[in-house]
Image (tube, helix red, strand yellow):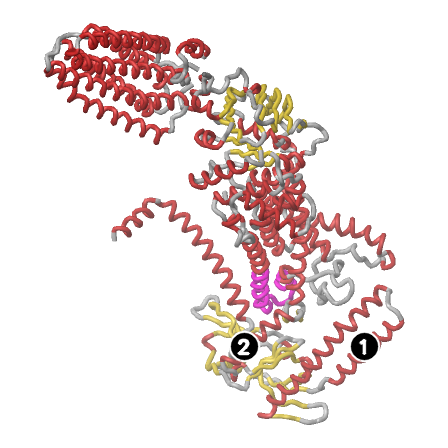
């Protein structure tokens, strides 16, 4: 009791400042939680196969779809609800506003199907029948199992074609483009091309007979269907499995429909690869610069000015670095490289256009001050006694630096890289100038020599968000994907940072902390 | 380097100054008491005052107590202050001086006990002249040695060393004349022996006073002259 | 009879070391930081295989002198010097004297234990590995020998791969001494080696210093006069960058020649 009173008095004695400070922390944490929560709910919710409502209006008209939001009707005490009912090809639009007062009935019949298609977006309605090329027809209850079975065959064939394209055809095409293809290559290309054509032809040329709840019917080739679901007939376990599958496809597939659908794998890969390359470029430069400033240079007025300059570089807007990268790296250095080494391909540029290398270098430049400052602070924290200890054992200054000072400054360097990664992974503006692409389905790392293609354009999560949000026709439709991609961007940065933090922790833990 | 008597009050630690001052004060108090003991013992004989002699014997316990007290204080200073240089020499000199003073106290009570015996046997005043002469010398030596200790006066201390040689020769001649008494008159053997014991004790007091003077030289100059030939002393000490 | 007393002399440089030749010799040495003089007109000889202590108030230049003995001041561009220092007769500032070589011959241990953030073994092997590759067997031997010499082997032989920073302060300081010994120095400079340690660890380091003097010349800087009195054979008292008094420790601590020394070692106000 007594103890409790004392501790209470103590915290009260710290006065309003303690509360103010704690309040600031709490607010920051709450904002962070809100941000992550919003992104997670909106982004991950997109993949959940929610039930489809069959809405009957007072005039007898029916529509099937999922409620997206509600809003008050202007000028009246009434609300209307927005349904996403798909069927762009049938209705010309995937949205439908419905005044709540007009709704007579909402049902969830199990026979409603949701088809994800390569064109025209979702179809929501009923499956009437499936007709095969050979004239067979499954209708009624037999239609749905037949659809699942045929779809599996189509998916399998599609996967084989994609594999052929990626592993055989594309490298050959690039070689042809680069003018290095031999006669054998050309023959191989032709045979691969014909194989693809054969497989394409072998896909079941089935047709689905569909009917919207509004009564319009539609004939849909099976080859355009990506996924077919009957969400109202699914139990929670099925839904969860479908959700997991949806998330996995989002992470592992390339984008479709002008970046408003499909996955973001190339963008994830591009982001991570670019950040890793950036770290590899910025580390040695930053560390060497910090070592020079802190260990080698005479600590005079000049060095003070240089230090101020470096610190101020961190404040230069990133788009300025983009312009610099475009001018110096892409047009300057890249242009000359093309002149000297890739003249045969001109006028199509190799390094004279934006690409992975230039983007990484631009970001390395952008984050260089951060790494220098962090490393310098780490170097300054190393006690003088450690340096003297090494010198007193007969080490030269270089040996002292390599064997004692730099290993001890390693955690600080990693702190610099963490800060650099955090900044670089989120930058979009400079990348738009020096190499990011709206659509680059080929990741810049593959099995073809030289494996890492520094000249290729690449996709980036940040730019992907920007593109989906501002360049796509239907922002409302792309919205869930934008949330999901934003969440992914945050997660990628988090993972990169955590990796560096764990590495730093390991390095620190190996020999304990500094004794001072 | 020579040190002066105020050197022990210049420490940064005032407590240390105080402790060292206490040491010196207590040593001087002990010296005063012992000096009075010697004087009283001699006077009790010369004035045939046996009650005074009894008091001298009783007071010896007070002298012993003072020595123990001073030793304790020195031990404490050594343990807690780890004195160096002049401070270390002061503590060592005080320990040794207290020990010598205690022995002088013992000699005083020895004189007093012999005096009681001589008074009780009413053995006349034979030998009293010698006792008076030597005791005068010895008391002056004691007084001077304590003064030289108090003032860190090595010149005075060196004089005591010379004085001790005189006392020794006085003692030798007194012995010879008392031997003559005993040979002349066999009845006087017992009282004269008592006087001889007293003279012997006085001579010892002189030796102890001489030791005190040597400690002063050690304290001030850092020289240990205990086993130095007195004739070389001036030369040795003067060098410093 | 002669007086039991060391013959006094008028200058520290002239002290009779006939029993042992000098290892280090400082001649008319002066050192300044920029315009600020730190040491002036110093001349003294450090006897071989003995412990010599430098004592004096803070800022008296004793550490500066110690660091001058293995040219640690070279790093500081504002330091200028006059006079010379000789190691076994060789001028340590001579152009043919490599500074790394000098520092191997004249090792140094600092006030705060400064083991490197490596294993115990790697710390001791650090100096050896600077001298080029050598067989692991030989490195093992030297590490064991050095740790034994520093009286640390029994405490760490089962955890040579553990971090040096896991050792206690006293063990760290002995590890640092072992690390220095492994390079095979002739002279060991100790800059307040026990001032950051508890009394027991401090005594262990002192005991080590005493044991090492059979093979090494040791120079010790300390604030702790009792420590100087306990471990050193010769003591030099410095004040305001000057050598005030230099002589056998026994004499200096019982009967110093000069009042400045007396005042310092007995804690009096000057």
> How far, Cα to Cα, is label 2 from label 1?
37 Å
Residue furthest to the right: A183
- Please tell me the numbered disc located at residue A411: none
Q: Is residue C205 left or right of residue A126?
A: left
Camera sees residue C37? no
- Which quadrant of the view contains residue A467? bottom right
- In percent of width and height, residue A93 lies at 61, 74
Disc tally is 2
- From the viewer's perspective, is C208 left or right of A297? left
Q: Which residue range is magenta in the image?
A: A465-492
Residue C126 seen? yes
Q: Main secondary structure of the magenta part?
A: helix
Q: Is residue A484 magenta?
A: yes
Q: Where residue A280 sits: x, y (%)?
A: 67, 53
Asked if the stretch drawn in magenta spans residue C110, the answer is no
Q: From the viewer's perspective, is A150 left or right of B37?
A: right
Q: Which mark is residue A49?
A: 2
Answer with the quarter of the image where residue B90 lies: top left
Q: Chain of mark 1?
A: A
**Earlier residue among tags 2 and 1:** 2
- Which of the pair A275/C136 is nearer the observer? C136
* Residue A462, x across and y down, in percent: 62, 59
Answer above or below: position of A69 versus C260. Answer: below
Q: Residue at x 46, y 81 (%)?
A: A104
Residue displayed at 22% across by 17% down: B34
Residue A193 numbered tag: 1
The answer to which image quadrant residue A255 occupies is bottom right
Image x and y of residue A401, in percent: 64, 43
| Number of the front mark, 2 or 1 | 1
């Amino acid at each position: 009791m007594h103890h409790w009173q004392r501790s209470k008095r103590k915290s009260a004695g710290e006065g309003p400042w303690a509360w103010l400070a704690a309040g600031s922390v709490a607010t920051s944490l709450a904002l962070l939680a809100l941000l992550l929560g919003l992104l997670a709910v909106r982004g991950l919710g997109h993949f959940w196969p929610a039930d489809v409502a069959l809405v009957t209006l007072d005039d007898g008209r029916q529509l099937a779809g999922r409620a997206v939001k509600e809003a008050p009707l202007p000028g009246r005490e009434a609300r209307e609800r927005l349904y996403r009912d798909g069927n762009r090809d049938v209705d010309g639009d995937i949205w439908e506003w419905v005044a709540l007062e007009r709704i007579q009935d909402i049902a969830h019949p199990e026979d409603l199907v949701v088809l994800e298609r390569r064109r025209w977006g979702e179809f929501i309605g009923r499956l009437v029948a499936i007709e095969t090329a050979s004239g067979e027809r499954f209708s009624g209850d037999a239609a749905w199992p037949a659809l699942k079975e045929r779809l599996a065959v189509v998916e399998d064939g599609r996967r084989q074609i994609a594999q052929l394209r990626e592993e055989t055809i594309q490298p050959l095409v690039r070689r042809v483009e680069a003018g290095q293809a031999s006669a054998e290559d050309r023959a191989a290309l032709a045979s691969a091309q014909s194989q693809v054509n054969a497989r394409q032809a072998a896909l079941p040329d089935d047709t689905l007979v569909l009917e919207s709840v509004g009564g319009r019917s539609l004939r849909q080739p099976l080859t355009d269907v990506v996924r077919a679901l009957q969400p109202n007939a699914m139990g929670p376990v099925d839904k969860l499995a479908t959700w997991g599958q949806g998330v996995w496809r989002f992470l592992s597939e390339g984008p479709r429909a002008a970046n408003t659908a499909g996955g973001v794998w190339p963008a994830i890969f591009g982001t991570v690869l670019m950040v890793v390359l950036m770290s590899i470029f910025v580390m040695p430069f930053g560390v060497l610069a910090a070592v020079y400033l802190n260990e080698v240079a005479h600590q005079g007025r000049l060095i003070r000015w240089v230090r101020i300059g470096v610190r101020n570089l961190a404040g230069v807007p990133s788009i300025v670095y983009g312009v610099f990268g475009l001018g110096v790296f892409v047009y300057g250095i890249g242009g000359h490289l093309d002149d000297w080494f890739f003249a045969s391909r001109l006028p199509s540029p190799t390094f004279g256009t934006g690409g992975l290398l230039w983007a990484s270098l631009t970001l390395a430049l952008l984050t260089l001050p951060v790494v220098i400052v962090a490393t310098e602070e780490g170097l300054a924290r190393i006690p003088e006694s450690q340096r003297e200890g090494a010198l007193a054992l007969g080490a030269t200054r270089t040996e002292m630096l390599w064997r004692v000072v730099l290993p001890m400054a390693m955690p600080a360097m990693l702190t610099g890289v963490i800060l650099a990664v955090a900044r670089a992974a989120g930058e979009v503006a400079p990348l738009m100038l020096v190499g990011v692409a709206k659509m680059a389905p080929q990741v810049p790392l593959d099995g073809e020599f030289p494996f890492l293609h520094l000249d290729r354009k690449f996709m980036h999560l940040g730019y992907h968000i920007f593109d989906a949000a501002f360049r796509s026709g239907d922002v409302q439709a792309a919205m869930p994907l934008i949330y999901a991609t934003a969440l992914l961007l945050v997660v990628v940065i988090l993972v990169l940072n955590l990796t560096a933090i764990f590495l730093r922790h390991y390095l620190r833990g190996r020999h304990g902390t500094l004794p001072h | 380097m020579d040190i002066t008597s105020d050197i022990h009050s210049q420490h940064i630690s005032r407590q240390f100054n105080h402790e060292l001052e206490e040491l010196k004060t207590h040593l001087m108090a002990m010296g005063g008491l012992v000096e009075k003991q010697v004087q009283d013992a001699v006077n009790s004989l010369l004035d045939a005052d046996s009650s005074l002699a009894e008091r001298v014997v009783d007071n010896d316990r007070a002298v012993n107590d003072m020595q123990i007290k001073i030793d304790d204080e020195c031990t404490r200073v050594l343990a807690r202050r780890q004195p160096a240089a002049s401070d270390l020499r002061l503590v060592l000199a005080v320990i040794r001086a207290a020990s010598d003073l205690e022995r002088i106290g013992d000699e005083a009570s020895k004189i007093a006990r012999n005096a009681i015996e001589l008074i009780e046997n009413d053995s006349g005043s034979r030998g009293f002249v010698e006792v008076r002469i030597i005791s005068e010398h010895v008391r002056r030596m004691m007084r001077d040695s304590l003064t030289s200790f108090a003032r860190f006066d090595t010149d005075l201390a060196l004089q005591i060393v010379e004085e001790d040689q005189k006392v020794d020769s006085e003692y030798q001649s007194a012995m010879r004349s008392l031997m003559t008494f005993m040979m002349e008159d066999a009845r006087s053997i017992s009282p004269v022996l008592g006087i001889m014991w007293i003279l012997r004790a006085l001579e010892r007091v002189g030796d102890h006073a001489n030791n005190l003077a040597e400690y002063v030289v050690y304290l001030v100059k850092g020289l240990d002259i205990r086993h130095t030939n007195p004739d070389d002393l001036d030369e040795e000490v003067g060098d410093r | 009879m002669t007086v039991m007393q060391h013959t006094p002399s008028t200058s520290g440089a002239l002290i009779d070391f006939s029993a042992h030749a000098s290892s280090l010799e400082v001649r008319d040495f002066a050192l300044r930081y920029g315009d600020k003089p730190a040491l002036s007109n110093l001349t003294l000889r450090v006897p071989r295989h003995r412990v010599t202590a430098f004592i004096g108030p803070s800022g008296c230049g004793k550490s500066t002198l110690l660091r001058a003995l293995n040219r640690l001041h070279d790093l500081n561009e504002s330091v200028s010097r006059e006079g010379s220092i000789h190691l076994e007769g060789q001028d340590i500032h001579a152009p043919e004297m490599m500074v790394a070589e000098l520092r191997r011959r004249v090792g140094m241990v600092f006030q705060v234990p400064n083991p490197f953030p490596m294993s115990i073994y790697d710390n001791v092997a650090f100096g050896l590995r600077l001298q080029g590759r050598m067989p692991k067997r030989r490195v093992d031997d030297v590490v064991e020998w050095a740790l034994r010499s520093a009286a640390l082997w029994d405490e760490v032989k089962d955890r040579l791969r553990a971090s040096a920073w896991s050792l206690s302060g006293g063990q760290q300081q002995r590890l640092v001494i072992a690390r220095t010994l492994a390079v095979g120095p002739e002279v060991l400079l100790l800059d307040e080696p026990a001032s950051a340690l508890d009394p027991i660890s401090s005594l262990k380091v002192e005991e080590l210093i005493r044991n090492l003097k059979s093979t090494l010349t040791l120079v010790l800087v300390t604030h702790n006069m009792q420590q100087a009195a306990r471990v050193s054979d010769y003591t030099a008292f410095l004040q305001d960058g000057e050598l005030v008094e230099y002589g056998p420790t026994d004499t200096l601590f019982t009967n110093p020649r000069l009042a400045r020394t007396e005042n310092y070692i007995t804690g009096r106000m000057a």
